Amino acid sequence: MKRRLPNRVIFGIYTIAYGNWSGILAEKPDNLPAISNEKSIEARLGSAFKQYKAAVSENHGIREHNLKLLLVPLSVRLGVDLDTTWIASMNSFAQHRGQILHQSSIDPQVQQPPDPATALDLIQKTIFPGLIRLDRVLQDLL
């Protein structure tokens, strides 16, 4: 008889949903649908996937908190599968982007424009290679 290994993505999404998102976030996001208490595995898996899909739909960022919410349920290990320097760069990039957006909406005259050469360098040397690594990690999970 052939033994099948459990699918890490399905297992990850299921355990995160039924573990109330503990271990990823300080608290479960408010906007996620309730999980099913039915006994059938199909209903419980469907409920877990519905909750993960809602978490993805509600995500609007690239900071570490957002990456945890999106990637840890898929069994991606931040700091192991993805470099901590890349994660810090994503945090910094998001923070800088947010400052520019929020300052420009308050007072467009005060805004310090980003240096295109610095931004391009960060994207080419750090962010893009990290995204390629993330793509490889996700492909390996399939």
Image (cartoon, rainbow, N blue to C red):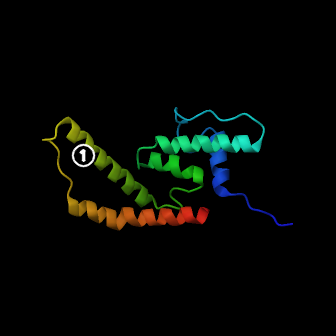
Would residue 14 appear left or right of 129 to someone viewing this image? right
Report crowding for label 1: few under 14, some 14 to 19, many 20 or more residues within 10 A (C-alpha). some
**Callout 1 amino acid:** Ile
Check the image and report above or below for 113 versus 85: above
Quarter of the picture containing the N terminus is: bottom right
Specify whether residue 6 is in view: yes
Percent x, y of residue 11? 68, 51
Specify whether residue 22 is in view: no
Q: Which residue is drawn at 45% across and 58% down?
A: 84
Q: Which residue is drawn at 68% across and 57% down?
A: 7
Q: Which residue is drawn at 52% across and 42% down?
A: 55
Quarter-of-image position of residue 54: top right
In front here: 68 or 52? Answer: 52
Check the image and report above or below for 75 versus 21: below
Percent x, y of residue 90? 38, 54
Q: Is mark 1 on a helix, strand or loop?
A: helix
Would residue 78 appear left or right of 126 to someone viewing this image? right
Would residue 73 appear left or right of 112 to someone viewing this image? right
Residue assigned mark 1:
100
Percent x, y of residue 79? 50, 58
In front here: 47 or 28? Answer: 47
Quarter of the picture containing the C terminus is: bottom right
